[in-house]
Image (cartoon, rainbow, N blue to C red):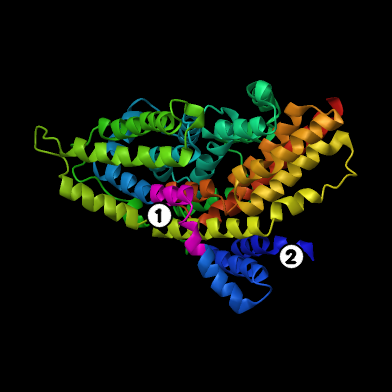
Amino acid sequence: MDWLVLLPPVVAIGLALWTRQVFLSLVAGLWVGTTILAGYNPLGGLREMASVVVQVFGDASNSRIILFSLLVGGLIALVQVSGGVAAFTRWVQGRGWGKTRRGAELLAFVVGLLIFVESSITSLIVGTLSRPFFDRLKLPREKLAYYCDATSAPVCMSIPLNGWGAFVLGLIIAQGYASGAVSLLVQSLVFNFFCLFAIGFALILALTGWGFGSMRRAEVRAATKGELTRRGSSPMISDDVANLAPIAPDRGHIADLIVPIAFMMVMIFVSLWITGDGNFMDGSGSTAVLWSVGSAIGLGMVLYAVPRRQGSLISLARSTEYVIKGASGLVGVVALLVLAFALGTVSRELEMGPYVVSLIGESAHTWWLPGVVFLVGCIVSFTLGSSWTTFAILVPLVLPLAEGLGISMPLMLGAVLSGGVFGDHASPLSDTSIISSMSAACDHVDHINTQLQYSILVASVSLVAFLIAGVVA
């Protein structure tokens, strides 16, 4: 009955995609998992579920991400009421950018490509800067959420000068490959097919406007009916926050947006340097994003309170009110993150990852082993909603296996990285996907439904690439 360990994430994900009730679906999957842990006692499962949810806050990294998500709402509200977002929109349009569908989508893509320090920050900035252009051109929020997601984890793992690279380097070093760890990681980037193809596919969509499936239907809906979100949907950020109007539209300046955002980016590097004891690569990513967004809010509040020609833009007291209002609009995001973290904890306690890996067995032939590793990584990351957990499970198994069988180690590591990022990009349990939905003010299940078909297409092409590489290598 080992297969029962797969039930919790399968139930949660299946119900979410079927019923569109993501919260109830996560609770159902969590209860199934805790019931198994409680010896198949449903009442014991309820007691265990309450305990697991509380334990989420016992993990400092989880708590920092939850606080970061609340503060993100405060920052979005603050820069919107300052008029900074509106001023940025006017500035971009004044230069002929973002006036067409292609221009708006390319703007979202390029911004996501340039912000590769941390995946959550990427999603936040892409959504905040691009939403006015998408809304004005009647492009669906699902499409914006896709660009937020497609340029976050895939870009961060393709340009690993961040916490992602540091984490993978640490795993490689822990396996005894300290002397060639950096070289191995760099070489593996060439074989990180899913990330490369996901980025390339997003660029193709932006340039051509091509689409299919649920995403195309969403685009037709927005273009013909003007419905940016599906009727009856539940966007991850309330309309009160997403549609906040500037306090003084004629006084906002582009600096009111750029200065806090730029400071946030600088603070990420500063935070990584501080938490890494002088080494950026050893810094804490969750701490960096929390410190950076908190610092950006603080700077924004001071900037808007400084007297100008017609007095201060927003008083400190009013800024505080807007920060709290923005944070309150993200209570749903926080609840979703807590449930996703709890389900991930239960899946790990059930040792779901090692079970899936064990399905490879010893009968795998070397030429298709990279493809199998990629598939296993996709399954583990999708059901757990965590690329880093997938890396931690597979790297210690795959690198010695590759060395023992004489298979290209960069190729096998690339398969692990690709499989892990697939889940971070496509799973409804991924915090990156959740934050992408929030940043785009999109219903989370709608985001997953429209994006999943694209992700599966990219994953299928990646699988073929890994099989070909396995033959050639």
- Looking at the rendered structure, the kind of residue marked 1 is Ile
Q: Is residue 378 visible?
A: yes
Task: Give yes or no for residue 260 being in the magenta stretch.
Answer: no
- The residue lying toward the viewer, choosing from 277 and 205, is 277
In front: label 2 or label 1: 2
- The C terminus appears in which quarter of the rendering? top right
* Residue with the mark numbered 2: 4
Q: CA distance from mark 2 to mark 1?
A: 35 Å
Considering only order in the chain, which callout, 1 or 2, is on the residue closer to the N terminus? Answer: 2
Q: Which residue is mark 1?
A: 237
Q: Nearer the viewer, residue 34 or 380?
A: 34
In the rendered structure, the answer to whether residue 91 lies left or right of residue 232 reads left
Magenta-tinted stretch: 53-69
Q: Main secondary structure of the magenta part?
A: helix
For residue 222, side relative to residue 353 (left or right)? left
Find residue 412 and report its horizontal and vertical position in percent: 75, 33
Q: Secondary structure at mark 2?
A: helix
What's the residue type where badge 2 is placed?
Answer: Leu
| Place of residue 98 in the rendered image (x, y in percent of width and height, measured from the top left) | 42, 33
Indicate the position of residue 327 as horizontal and vertical percent values: 33, 53
